[in-house]
Image: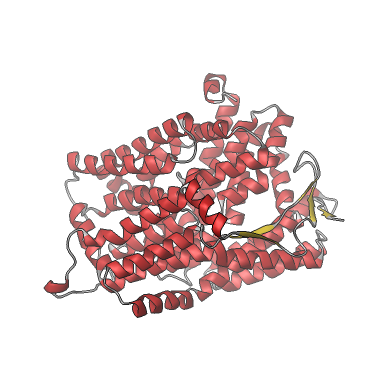
Amino acid sequence: MPWSQNYDPLRSPALSTAAAALPVVAMLAFIASGRVRAWWAAICGLALAAVIGIAVFKIPVMSAIGSVGYGIAYSIFPIGWIIINVLFLHRLTVISGRFDALRHQLAGLVPDPRVQVILIAFGFGAFVEGAAGFGAPVAITAALLLQLGFPPLQASGLALIANTAPVAFGSLGIPLITLQQVTGLDLHGLSSMAGRQLPLFSAMIPAWIVTVYGGWSALRATWPIAVAAGMSFGVVQFLVSNFHGPWLVDAVAAVVSLAATLLAYRWFPPSSIPTLKSPTQNITHPPSSRPSRWSPWLPWLILMAFIFAWGIPAVKSALDHLASTQIPIPYLDQQIQRMPPVVAQPRVESVLFKLNILSATGTGVLLAGIFSGLAMRQTLYIILETWLRTWYEMRLPLLTIAAMLSLGNLTKYSGADATLGLALAHTGPFYPFFGTLLGWLGVALTGSDTAANVLFGSLQQVTANQLGISPYLMTAANSTGGVMGKMIDAQSIVVAGAATGSHGNEGKILRYVFPHSLTLAILMGLWVAALASLKSLAFLVVR
């Protein structure tokens, strides 16, 4: 018989909610303090989650162990598999000198660092998010900004803040496709609704990150470029999501935004250009060995080609047919039962670990790295040695991610996540605002907009129906509110720190981005509340 979750184990909603929140709050407090290393903070949070899950929420001990095992496995594959291989490709470009050459070319094409932030962190990051997601855009754009001369903390923070607007449509629309599977709602309706909630914020983000970088003076100098980048992305995001679907929203919007940014920079060049210090990693080549003008872009073009090829459904299906298996997690699969009101009817959780080594995005990134290394005339020995060294150097970040994902799993399968969600759901007429913050909380807890939709998508649907609110509005808000939590989830912070060589400074990164995450989440909540209440905006809520 499966074990049924109890969302008020202490028979006091306030006490049960406090107990559910304690592990996550403690972990984030440790990280933010700057006095506890991230991996220690994650392990402490995991230990506390295990104690509360077993002693308070009464999850069976073996199911708790299964939750931890699932978190460790998932941290290695697919998440670690993507992160390691992206950093592997990046380090090959550094060794070969292509990254240094790319830095010089970007500095020549767009020498203004205020515009580089828009071009790389926002535009290029959105493109990678649309194709890969799962930490890849933060890892790549943070490393690029670092090589352009941005300080490590700033490069990490700006990459995280920029990686918001495209997240709901990331990985070829996976978050919304998953939301449709959880709720049974029409996929096009969910895509349309998300595409009506996000464009306002997509238009804001370029100006936002420029202001974070250089203050109001930086925005005054570059506002036409920021407006062109944000407005073009937002308009295309609205059109593609409403008239096509969630699959190509980020890719098309990013390409248009990149073109608009470059055109606006040519038409409205800032009168003065601030300078950055020289990057710490600077490889000098003799004239005979300097790469040609196009070769610095070759590894990234190869990466984009592989990412898009691996994102095509037909390719994924063919590779899955060759090698893919789903492994039931012992003591967890079919052993946990979700209960109302989180779900409409009691539902036994299926917990399967998908081992799709060929079709995984990280495999495409690995092959891109190998092909790029050969194209950059690196020997097989250097390629292999670089890959193995990357695994070794990422051992503590991977440990951190494993502990955090295990904590998230314990929170989910013990029912503590639903206890937190129900606390926000009991807000009556203010639910559109707090329901949006629930999505933000879900991504902050799990590190994934997709996972947050799995956690709270059904709860949003049930609560919206009970309150007479459009279920499309609130389920989409779970995803669009969640994107604002992406910059503070521990997994993303660890990835950003690893990409910029700032492992151990995760607390500083969290303090850098947290005010922006909370402010944007509140603004999104107010926007969703307006859509739910103002009759003059009813045309935006068609479902």
Q: Quadrant of residue 384?
A: bottom left
Residue 343, position as x, y percentages in the image: 75, 42
- Note whether 216 is above or below 63 in the view shown: above
Out of 369 and 256, give the one closest to the viewer. Answer: 369
Q: Quadrant of the C terminus?
A: top right
Residue 475 at x, y = what percent? 62, 37
In the visual, does 9 lie left or right of 199?
right
Q: Give the vertical position of 81 relative to 479 (above or below).
A: below
Instruction: Measuring from the top left, give residue 26's x and y in whole percent.
Output: 64, 64
Position of residue 505 in the picture relative to residue 213 (left or right): right
Question: How many numbered callouts?
Answer: 0
| 361 versus 345 height, above or below | below
Name which residue lies at 61% across and 55% down.
445
Answer with left or right where residue 303 lies relative to residue 273: right
Q: Nearer the viewer, residue 310 or 39?
A: 310
**Looking at the rendering, in which quadrant would you find the N terminus?**
bottom right
The reply to whether residue 508 is visible in this rendering is no
